[in-house]
Image (cartoon, rainbow, N blue to C red):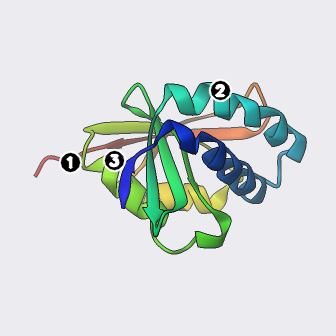
Amino acid sequence: MIREMQENEIKTLSALWLNASLKAHAFIKADFWRKNQSLIETKYLPQSLTYVYTEHNCLKGFLSLSDHKEVAGLFVATSFQGQGIGSALMNFVQKRYPSLTLDVYAKNENAVRFYQKHNFRPIKTYIGDDTGAESIKMRWQKQCI
């Protein structure tokens, strides 16, 4: 089931975010992620519209939107990756919004392929101020039939 995040789930989602970030972004020092975990809990999750994927009362993933147009993050618990949870979350928001943008690390090739599969196209590449890693800004636009 996909639903909006409840405030009491922030700590659990923060831990999910940290574990998934460490796995997906081995090219960035682990300390970067650990230092930012408190911001996830106090700023990013509370200020975003976050949809969670739950099954049997277990939080398996989440997608956060900022300004109803920017995918601020899509994370699936490491033990549940590859089971279609990320696609379910992405399809959920793509049905509800006319266009979306996001930023993804170029070295996170699995994520880049995932977003391309969901019809996101690169707009530009840039070097992130916070990590110095190359990132890609991508955009998806709902197609009129």
Residue type at mark 2: give it.
Thr
Residue 48 percent coordinates (x, y): 48, 30
SS class, disc 2? helix
Residue beneath disc 3: 93
Displayed quadrant of residue 24: bottom right
Residue type at mark 1: give it.
Gln
Disc assigned to residue 143 = 1
Residue 39 percent coordinates (x, y): 70, 28
Q: Quadrant of the N terminus?
A: bottom left
Residue 17 percent coordinates (x, y): 66, 49
Residue type at mark 3: give it.
Val
SS class, disc 3? helix
Of pointers 3 and 1, the one earlier in the residue sequence = 3
What residue appears at the point 64 percent right and 49 percent down from the top-left corner?
Answer: 12
Determine whether 143 is above or below 130 in the image: below
Left/right placement of residue 68 relative to residue 113 reads: left
Displayed quadrant of residue 109: bottom right
Kindly report the distance in space between the C-alpha atoms of the residues bearing marks 3 and 1: 14 Å
Q: Name the foreground residue: 71 vs 132.
A: 71
Q: Residues within 10 Å of mark 3 (few under 14, many from 20)?
A: some
Disc assigned to residue 42 = 2
Q: Nearer the viewer, mark 2 or mark 3?
A: 2
Q: Residues within 10 Å of mark 2 (few under 14, many from 20)?
A: few
Of pointers 1 and 2, the one earlier in the residue sequence = 2
SS class, disc 1? loop
Kindly report the distance in space between the C-alpha atoms of the residues bearing marks 1 and 2: 36 Å
Residue 139 percent coordinates (x, y): 42, 40
